[in-house]
Image (cartoon, rainbow, N blue to C red):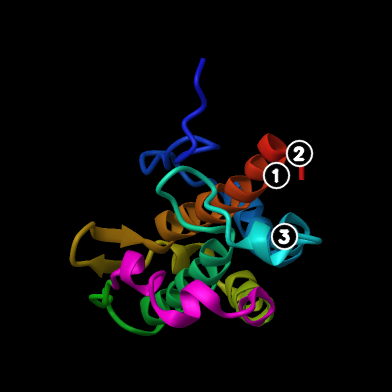
């Protein structure tokens, strides 16, 4: 069976029910992502960082910068969702962001440090939320209405998804 390099852990299941136990697990994923991501890229050379994780895919460097961009946006979306009534959030062109100079060439340590800070704040914030808070909604212009529980499930998946892109590439290449 051929592995789908785009989805090393499978595609996101937006129909999955979020239970209080699953929510705790998702928050733990958010909390652990910085260390897991650092371990995934640890010891990689500049050439390896500039290797695409799949044909026509982003480089490892772009993945690291993408996760920083994406999770910064997600943190803000959670804050908006908790402090406003069903706000419409701003989408962004992630593929174009990955092609900017900082996305293509900045040292990964910059984004790893940003991920450390974002996730430290985000984890404190998530752990402070009540069950009712996770039922609050945001509106995504492309995806429609989403609960903060659904958004949390998405970013649990997103964290594991991009970490697996790097770890699977390392396995395939014997790094």
Q: Earlier in the sequence, mark 3 or mark 2?
A: 3
Q: Is residue 137 visible?
A: no
Query: Decide: marks 1, 2 in contact (CB < 8 A)?
Result: yes
For numbered disc 2, what is the local secondary structure?
A: loop
Asked if residue 95 is among those painted magenta in the image, a careful observer would answer yes
Does residue 58 lie above or below 98 as drawn?
above
Of residue 133 and residue 142, the one placed in the foreground of this image is 142
Report the Cα–Cα distance between label 1 and label 2. Answer: 6 Å
Q: Residue at x 42, y 42 (%)?
A: 12
Which secondary structure class fits the magenta region best?
Answer: helix
Residue corresponding to mark 2: 174
Query: Decide: marks 3, 2 in contact (CB < 8 A)?
Result: no
Q: Residue at x 46, y 57 (%)?
A: 58
Residue corresponding to mark 3: 41
Q: Position of residue 156 (x, y in %)?
A: 55, 54
Report the Cα–Cα distance between label 1 and label 3. Answer: 9 Å
User: Bounds of the magenta span?
Assistant: 92-111
Residue corresponding to mark 1: 170
Of residue 166 and residue 90, the one placed in the foreground of this image is 166
Res 15 → quadrant: top left
Q: Is residue 60 visible?
A: yes
Left or right? Give the position of 84 relative to 155.
left
């Amino acid at each position: 069976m051929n592995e789908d390099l785009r989805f090393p852990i499978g595609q996101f299941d937006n129909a999955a029910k979020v239970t209080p136990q699953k929510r705790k697990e998702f928050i733990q994923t958010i909390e652990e992502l910085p260390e897991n991501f650092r371990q995934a890229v640890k010891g990689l050379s500049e050439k390896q960082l500039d290797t695409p994780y799949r044909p026509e895919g982003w480089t490892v460097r772009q993945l690291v910068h993408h996760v920083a961009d994406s999770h910064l946006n997600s943190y803000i979306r959670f804050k908006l969702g908790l402090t406003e009534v069903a706000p419409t959030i701003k989408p962004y062109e992630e593929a174009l962001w990955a092609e900017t100079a900082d996305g293509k060439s900045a040292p990964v340590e910059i984004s790893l440090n940003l991920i450390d800070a974002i996730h430290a704040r985000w984890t404190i914030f998530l752990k402070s939320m009540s069950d009712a808070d996770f039922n609050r909604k945001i509106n995504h212009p492309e995806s429609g209405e989403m609960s903060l529980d659904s958004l949390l499930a998405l970013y649990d998946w997103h964290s594991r998804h991009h970490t697996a892109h790097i770890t699977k590439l390392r396995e395939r290449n014997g790094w």
